[in-house]
Amino acid sequence: AAEEEAEAEAEVEAEVRLVGFERGKEAWAMSLAERLASQLKKKEQGNALFRRGEFERALRRYEASNSRAPEAADLAKAIEAASCGGDEEAASAANERKAAAEQVRLACLVNMAACQLRLGEHGAAAKSCSAALDIAPGSAKALFRRGQARLALAELSGAKEDLLAAAKADPKSREVRAALTQLKAAQGRAREEERGAFGGIFT
């Protein structure tokens, strides 16, 4: 019995040998198609993390996705080369890749803002939304989330402009209507504080 106990307590040692290691390609070494595929993969990873409530990790994935996005200059060169060569099919494919890359980048920027809002990074969220609006000026989500960020930063005039534009772009959004209600309450508090400040001067 004593021998059995000794055997049970005996340490087990194992040697692990690395027989192979393959490093992923750096973005600069990828073809346009590979960069687009990597960009999309990082975005999907970010989405999965976001759904699990892991907002910091999701944010890093979205940032990584945008860093993998094909450069606009490279996409333009591919389109120009295909057009000059008379290859309409290649030109069409290059244009589709450009549009797809922009859509993924737009989605990542809006999703980055969603993460940043949840992490209390309101200034960063507003910047992410502004970058998204450079791509799609009428994006209801980008307008809404920038409005939320500006509301949290007490930038009430900017928040009002964004939220009204978001409401116009998506009239059925309950989130936007709720944010407008919050804005109205914040404006009321600001007016009360202003009256109190000026009232103190003349008493």
Image (cartoon, grey):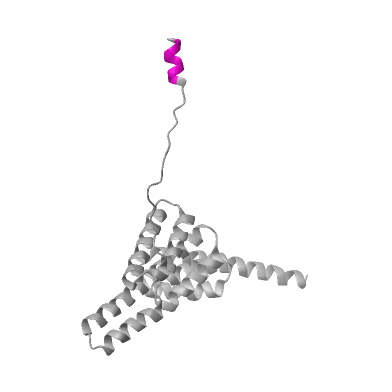
Work out whether residue 35 can be spotted: yes
Query: Residue 169's quadrant in the figure?
Result: bottom left
Work out whether residue 141 can be spotted: no
Image location (x, y in percent) of residue 187: 57, 69
Query: Residue 13's quadrant in the figure?
Result: top left
Query: Residue 14's quadrant in the figure?
Result: top left
Quarter of the figure that contains the C terminus: bottom right
For image coordinates 39% across by 53% down, the residue present is: 21
Quarter of the figure that contains the N terminus: top left
Q: Is residue 173 left or right of residue 63?
A: left
Q: Nearer the viewer, residue 201 or 59?
A: 59
Q: Which residues are magenta?
A: 2-8
Q: Name above or below for residue 128 compared with residue 44.
A: below
Image location (x, y in percent) of residue 4: 42, 14
Q: Is residue 43 left or right of residue 128?
A: left
Image location (x, y in percent) of residue 16: 42, 40
